[in-house]
Amino acid sequence: MTDLYSTSQEFVTLRLDGQLLGIPVLQVHDVLKAQNMTPVPIAPNWIAGLINLRGRIVTCIDLRARLGLPPATEEDDVTGMSVVVEQNGEPYSLLIDRVGDVLKLPLDDYERNPVTLESTWAEVSAGVYRLDGELLVILDVERLLDFAAFSQAA
Amino acid sequence: MDDLLSEFLTETNESIDVVDVELVRLEQNPNDSEVLDNIFRLVHTIKGTCGFLGLPRLEAVAHSAENVLGKFRDGELSVTPEAVTLILASLDRIKELLAALEETEAEPDGDDNDLIQQLDACAEGEGPAAAPAEETEPAVEEAPVAEAPAAEVQEEVDPGLGRALKAGEVSLEELEAAFNAAPGPELEETEEAPSVEPIVSDAAEESVDDSVLRDFGGLPGVIGAFESALEVLVQSGKCPALGDPDKLARVSEDFGHLTLAAMNQDDALVKTVADGLQSAVVWDVALLASVSAGMRSELSSFGLPSDELDVVQTALERQAHLIVPPAPKETAQKSATDKNNQKGASNQSVRVNVDLLEDLMNLVSELVLTRNQLNQMVRRLEDSEFAVPLQRLSQCTTELQEGVMKTRMQPIGNAWSKLPRIVRDLSLELDKDIDLEMHGAETELDRQVLELIKDPLTHMVRNSADHGVEMPSVRERAGKSAKGTIKLDAYHEGGHIVITISDDGAGINAEKLRAKALENGLATEAELDAMSESQIQRFIFHAGLSTAQEVTSVSGRGVGMDVVRTNIEKIGGTVDMTSTFGKGTTFYIKIPLTLAIVSALIVESRDERFAIPQIAVLELVHADAKGENAIEHINSTPVFRLRNRLLPLVYLRDVLGFERGEHTGEAFIVVTQVGSFVFGIVVDQVFDTEEIVVKPVAPALSHLNTYSGNTILGDGSVIMILDPNGVASQVSSTNTDSEQDDMAAKAADARMSDRETMLVFKAGNETPKAVPLSLVARLEEIDVERIENRDVRPTVQYRGQLMPLLTMNPETVLREEGKQAVLVFTDDDHTMGIACDEILDIVESDLSVEISTQREGILGTSVIAEKVTEIIDVAHYSRQAFSDWFSADRKKSNTSSAKAVDNANLLVVEDSAFFRNMLRPLLSAAGYRVTVAQDAEEALQLRERSRDFDLIVSDIEMPGKSGFEMAQDIRAGGRWQHVPMIALSSLSDAKDFEKGRKSGFNDYVVKLDRDALLETITEQLNAKTQSEAA
């Protein structure tokens, strides 16, 4: 995530269980509407299923399950949208509640994770941006998809 | 990596592989000059190329090896295994160096003096020239040190050579020198007049060579002269191809080497250099003449006498035919070489990076999927304008797919290429004499599969050589030739390739293996007792057995056979073996041709679809909700009776962890085979099969061994591909070993061996009927319209004959329309059909027939598959159909030798009521008087009562006294001592036959072979009559 140290960076913002999250815009390959997913029985619970994205098989990650959040309820107003990122050439789609704007943020507003951040979050958070009235947690996609690590977690 | 270097690596590796194989051939046929020439050429090329690339270590090793080969060729050294081993060792060293080179792009440090000394010593061994070989070594060692500037060159000249150094060219020249040093004197004494240079080789020229070069300033001088000459040509526009200064320098160098080599009469080097030149520029005679003239004038500026210059110039010009391509002489020579050298067609092929092919394959796979999707969409539209273009697209896609698949196909011989060497090394090491035969090396399969089977194959051949083939002395004692043979065979069968590896070695000692299996707790004594020899032999595939070291020493086989099996099964293949103790062992491997596209069965469980690779699927069975065809449970473990065998089942929904619902309703059972383990996967629904493109699962899922991949179906949906191995491991997880189940099941099968296979059908009423399958010739469905004369005596024209069609009982009605199921029975020229309503099943069953004589045509009843079944009396119906079916008249009128000896008295000893009831009418119809006995005791009682018989027909397996025992008893003395006896049994192998003979039977007939029985009876009776007459 060396890009974080240039003067400003653009992020796709996501909403998950009320929390605003960001992924560097260059890492996002696609933003998808709700898709028909093929479930994968006996897979870890954070694997929501597989989809066919233009002939490629994409593994869908249930980000709520991955981050230990409760399953979505009516109130969460879930759109079923997802963002597609890649890890080692393998596409993954991250299921989130809603997709927000793309924000260009100055580095001045960036801060490291607070030391008290809960471990699941600290593991996948690359830092925090202070926005007006809200905090934006930047997701570290690489660590989020480090499957060896989450096999253990799962 | 430098293109040149990488190409060099690929080529050299290939050459080395070829040399490996060829050397082994040479060793077997030391006089095959063609093979030797080929080896020599390849090693030489390796050496030459190494020289050009500045790889001193490689070149030195290759050079010394070539020296030895040269001596072979000249007949100075005989081709001994030791010498070949040495050359193979140097090839290995070259391989090591190449590997290092590939990694670091530089030769590793170190030297090869040990090897070179051995090689040189070997070359000297019988060679006349002792001195030159030694020179090689120092020359090579000097190489890295001698980085002297060009100015100092002359002082450092090697006196024997006129070698000089030029900055930046050091190693190359040093090597050149090293190369020249050794063969130099040898040439004087031994080299035959080189065929390419007919006029050459007056002593004058030999002597000039040194002095001339020295005067020119050595090789660099000559090169310099060429360089200047070529520069002039380029400037005058005569040779634009050399505009690039680097290329110019390289070509000049080549010319220098060429001249030097030509003067030294080193034809091989000349050839190599000339090839290089030829590939650099397209030369013609005029151009070459200009070069040579230019060079001459350049050299003349050194103030050399013109006669010396002549020598140099002619040396060069004499090689012109090698450099100028279409010279007829060269063409002729080349085409001759082409015959020997398969690589001759190299300009017809292009090297393509494997990654590129993989990418292409992936793209084609995508294309296939998209095509399938389009097809599905268009199919839903009526009269779509897309239909025609889509069809065309579809066809092109298929062809493209096939084409790309072909590019991935490689002959299996590529995987075998290392085997001759391995076998050879092993046979030397173990002091055995082993021949390796390879058939079907051209059989092609996907290179991915090829890579994957390479190691298992190698392992198995190694095993065969190591453990299979015995020591020559042992072989001779066993009456075999001292030389053992390992045979490799490959051929296509369906969409698979079958590879067999067989040896004529010791075979597998089932006894020892059995003891070991028992010791290791793999099976209990009882289980083992029930197993056949071959089942016990299959234990070598067993992990627990084969990995244990001490077992190996006992069983003589099996290190890692489980690994072999696992590896082969991993790619969807199967492996099996047969072995005869003392005779040899054969392994069968069956693998799919390609892994990329497979045929898969699409099934559904809990509304989710899954694919099961077709190769693992044996059959599909429909299970009813209840009744005879339902899934049963033993303490909640589901099982299914499949043709009288319990099939272990696993519910796919359980495997996949779906919520466990009540197991109700109909289900489909996918009978699946993994290795030799057969089990059923219960699914809710079965769809059709589809060609699918297997894609690996995402890394996040790769730890799940239940899936072997995923794919996109024609409708665009993603589907998981089940891995039968993974599913099987779940089935047997409670049992830890899947094979044991299988073994037990097979053992059970073996116990059933004296059972009969029955055809079960319905006719007339609801009671199932059965008839031994062996009596039924065919099952036919006959169009009712073809039934003639249906009210009186229905007949059908069948295979050019009139076939009477009988009904089982009065209730049976022939169908009015559609097709009528008919069981066809034939005997010589008689055919009859029995109409039935429905064929139910084919079942293996023991024949405890309850006799009932109340109904005609029914021998009795038996419980088959838990149902009371009527066994029909075929003889009854055939009597109806043809009054002469069984009659002696017919037999007499026949050409058959089974001419009944009238009124002979026969005793039939048979425990099975079914057979008794089959045999009695048969034999009495043939004109014999028949007495039956239920067992040996009953028969022997008849003897006590002084009954006389002309002949005894007896079953073997009977309760109480067996047929063998009875025969021994009879032959031991008494009334029946000389009565001919015929054994009747379902056991039919040679061993039983022999045993039967030993215990006193005169002949042996397989049950239900009526003709053979009648014939044998006649034979024995006639023999008896004759011997009595005599």
Image (tube, coloured by chain):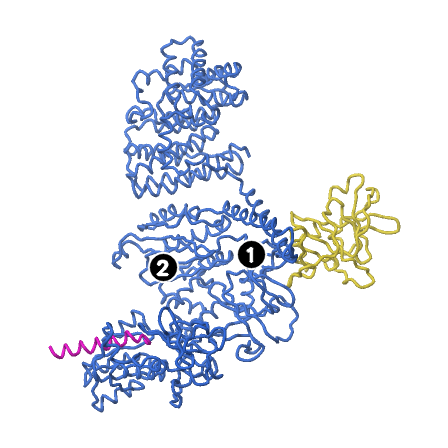
Check whether the beta carbons of the residues at disc 1 and disc 2 lie within 8 A of each other: no
Does the magenta stretch mainly form a helix, a strand or a loop? helix
Is B1027 colored magenta in this rendering? yes
Q: Is B440 drawn above or below residue B1006 in the view shown?
A: above
- The residue to which callout 1 is attached is B691
Chain bearing mark 1: B
Which color has been applied to chain B in this rendered view?
A: blue
Residue at 43% across, 36% down: B345
Q: Is residue B959 visible?
A: no
Residue B315: image x %, image y %? 37, 18
Q: Secondary structure at mark 1?
A: strand
The yellow-coloured chain is labelled: A
Q: Amino acid at mark 2?
A: Thr
Q: Amino acid at mark 1?
A: Glu
Local crowd at mark 1 within 10 Å, few (<14), some, or many (≥20)?
A: some
| Numbered marks: total | 2
Query: Between disc 1 and disc 2, whose residue precedes?
Result: 2
First to last magenta residue range: B1007-1030
Residue B575: image x %, image y %? 44, 59
Relative depth, front residue between B426 and B362: B362
**Quadrant, the C terminus of chain B:** bottom left
Q: Is B779 drawn above or below residue B462 in the view shown?
A: below
Locate residue B283 relative to residue B910 in the image: left or right: right
Local crowd at mark 2 within 10 Å, few (<14), some, or many (≥20)?
A: many
Task: Please give the label number shown on residue B585.
Answer: 2
Location of residue B861 by image quarter: bottom left
Q: Secondary structure at mark 2?
A: strand
